[in-house]
Amino acid sequence: MNDSDLAFASIEEIGKLFRTRKLSPVEITKLMLARIEQLNPKLNAYITVTAEVALDQAEKAESELFALRGRKGHRDRGALHGIPISLKDNIYTKGIRTTAGSKILTDFIPKEDAPVVAHLKQAGAVLLGKTNMHEFAYGVTSNNPHYGPVRNPWDLQRIPGGSSGGSAAAVSAGLCYGSIGTDTGGSIRIPASLCGVVGLKPTWGRISTEGVVPLSPLLDCTGPLARSVRDVAILTGAVYFRVGREPSLARVGTLRANPQKTCLGIPRQLFFDALSTDVRKAFDSALRDLCKAGVTTTDISIPLLDETEDAGNRIAWVEAILYHSQQGYFTARSAEYGEDVRARIEMGAKVSAVDYLRALEIQKHFTLQLHMALAESDADAIVYPSTPIEAPLIDQESSRIGKHDYPTRAILLRHNRPANLAGVPAISLPCGFASSGLPIGLQFMGGVSSEAVLLRIAKIFERTQPQARRPPV
């Protein structure tokens, strides 16, 4: 493999090279750091690069993996051992600044790691740095007024999505082998879709959000982004909270689901009301590929789907202003927020108690409707486009679909709020390209704790349509 092939190899492929001593963790870490130095000025995917930390961790991984088996010092921590990854910059890292993409936390250095970071360290992962994001995770563009906008590797004039835009851009451009982001209304899946990578939002509570700067605790989730379903399964397995004798999700990627025993529900509300021509073509093609593989489909109805965006917004507005007021940020330092984030936090003060409680009622009833629809139709998951449009231009405030203009933020959130509101897992993966060459995403959403099912279904589709292109950056 040349350096470019190594940069875009899978976690599993790099791990095999380590264990046959054809490549070392230090060598691959130096390659990643060199690529970051070369490409990050264009992409602005990283806020902080932790070169010294990464090389120290890589040297430790190398000494453990390369010590003779059975001898003192040898240790194989598993698939992530020695693998360079990144973290979204709202996740606490001991001794490394955690800005949450904000001016207010520019110099904040946590005293402890978030549990998800501790799990990754235990697995032997190598931390390359902290990725750029939408300020305080409260937006879908990653146009950051304090650290500059993240740029999409497929077109530097376009957004990568958000709020985990730096994570998705870094993964897509071969500047790490995976990243951990957060998702409150699509913040993992939107950038995964727009940057042509795989992103998993887990069931609420199955991956710890402790030690993560919150946006809306009722909706916040932490989850992985990577270039393949298998790599996402490996990352998930390292940080996923298992109950009882549940098998590790790290092994799910090696299992083959039976397409003939897989049924997907197609909800005819919300998800298909407004789609760009290229997104609809890509979705229809993806559905045909799934059916050719043996998957069956069925129409399902979830009446409250149309109300999920508004309900999710109201919950997030209230919880955001509560957190920022409690911390004293919003009362004492409101001028230090970016204009768009400050305006959204201010919305929380305008939501009445009745409207907030109504949003919680919708959340409860929608969750019930979703699970009943899956059960009554005998569907394993539902399928729909990850986003209705391809990546918009930076600073593009609206997007035209047919004869109508839609606010960029609203149209990108539209398909992604439902999974957060119901607290269920959802996964976005690439399903082709628009005529412009921009990636398009396909999303599967399942019932509570159905991550293993979604990963298997995603692998079925991934086999029908492998993505070989690399971004032109």
Image (cartoon, grey):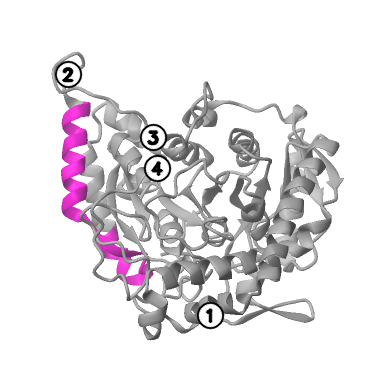
Quadrant in the rendering for residue 11: top left
Which is in the foreground here, disc 1 or disc 2?
1
Residue 68, numbered circle: 2
**Residue furthest left as drawn:** 72
Q: Name the residue under label 3.
A: 13
- The percent coordinates of residue 332 (x first, y second) are 36, 81
**Residue furthest front as drawn:** 353
Q: Mark 4 points at which residue?
A: 9
Q: Distance between the residues labelled 3 and 1?
A: 48 Å
What crowding class fits label 4: few (fewer than 14 Cα within 10 Å), some (14-19), or many (20 or more)? some
Q: Is residue 73 left or right of residue 286?
A: left
What crowding class fits label 1: few (fewer than 14 Cα within 10 Å), some (14-19), or many (20 or more)? some
Residue 205 vs residue 165, the one in the foreground: 205
First in sequence, mark 1 or 4: give its number. Answer: 4
First in sequence, mark 1 or 2: give its number. Answer: 2
Which is in the foreground here, disc 3 or disc 1?
1
Which is in the foreground here, disc 2 or disc 3?
2
Q: What element carries label 1?
A: helix
Are the residues tagged 2 and 3 within 8 Å (C-beta)?
A: no
Quadrant in the rendering for residue 328: bottom left
Residue pictured at 61% horizontal, 37% vertical? 449
Q: Is residue 291 left or right of residue 461?
A: right
Are the residues tagged 3 and 1 within 8 Å (C-beta)?
A: no
Q: Identify which amino acid the numbered label 3 is placed on.
A: Glu
The region drawn magenta spans 36-65
Residue 466 appears anywhere in the view: yes
**Quarter of the C terminus within the rendering:** bottom left
Q: Name the residue under label 1.
A: 346
